[in-house]
Amino acid sequence: FNEAISFQIYCETQEQVDYYWEKLSEGGDKNAQQCGWLKDKFGLSWQVVPTVLLTMLQDKDSNKKERVMKAMLQMHKLDINALTKVYREE
C-alpha cells in the first residue's frame, strides 16, 4: 500500500466516529490526523466520515458548503455537532 490508497468508514453518529477514530488511530501517526484522515499503526490511511457531512457538502447553498468545508479543514477528528452548527448559521 502507498499514499494513493485509503479506506473510508462512513458513520451515522458521533459515537461511531469516536469509536473508529480511537481504535484506528491507536499507535498510528498523530501528525497524519487532519480533516477526518488518520494513519493506523500499519501506516494505512483511513477517512472516518460522518454521513451527514456528505449531505451538507451537496447542499445547493454555496455559503453553507463553504462554511462546512472551512470548519472541516480545521479539524482532526470530525465533529458532527460543530459541522452542523456552522452549516445552520445564517
Image: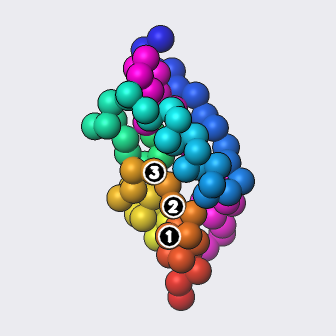
Task: Please name the residue that numbered disc 2 is placed on.
Answer: 79
The image shows residue 31 at horizontal and vertical percentages of 28, 37
Label 1–label 2 contact, CB within 8 A: yes
The circle drawn on residue 65 is none
Q: Are marks 2 and 3 in contact (CB under 8 Å)?
A: yes
Amino acid type, mark 1? Ala
The residues bearing labels 1 and 2 have C-alpha atoms spaced at a distance of 5 Å
Separation (CA) of disc 2 from disc 3: 6 Å
The residue range painted magenta reads 38-62
41 to 34, vertically: above or below: above
Separation of residues labelled 1 and 3 (CA atoms): 11 Å
Q: How many marks?
A: 3
Assess disc 2: are there few (<14), some (14-19) or many (≥20) residues with their C-alpha within 10 Å of its C-alpha: some
Quarter where residue 70 is shown: bottom left
Q: Residue at x 53, y 77 (%)?
A: 85
| Residue pictured at 56% horizontal, 70% vertical | 81
Q: Secondary structure at mark 3?
A: loop
Inspect the magenta stretch and tell me whether residue 55 lies in it: yes
Residue at (37%, 41%) from the top-left corner? 33
User: Residue under circle 3?
Assistant: 77
Q: Is residue 12 visible?
A: yes
The residue that mark 1 highlights is 82
- Secondary structure category for the residue under label 1: helix
Q: Amino acid at mark 2?
A: Asp
Residue 63 can be seen, yes or no = no
Q: Are marks 1 and 3 in contact (CB under 8 Å)?
A: no
Q: Position of residue 45 (x, y in %)?
A: 46, 27
Left or right of residue 24: residue 14: right
Rendered location of residue 54, percent (x, y): 65, 54
Q: Amino acid at mark 3?
A: Lys
Which is more toward the observer, 65 or 34? Answer: 34
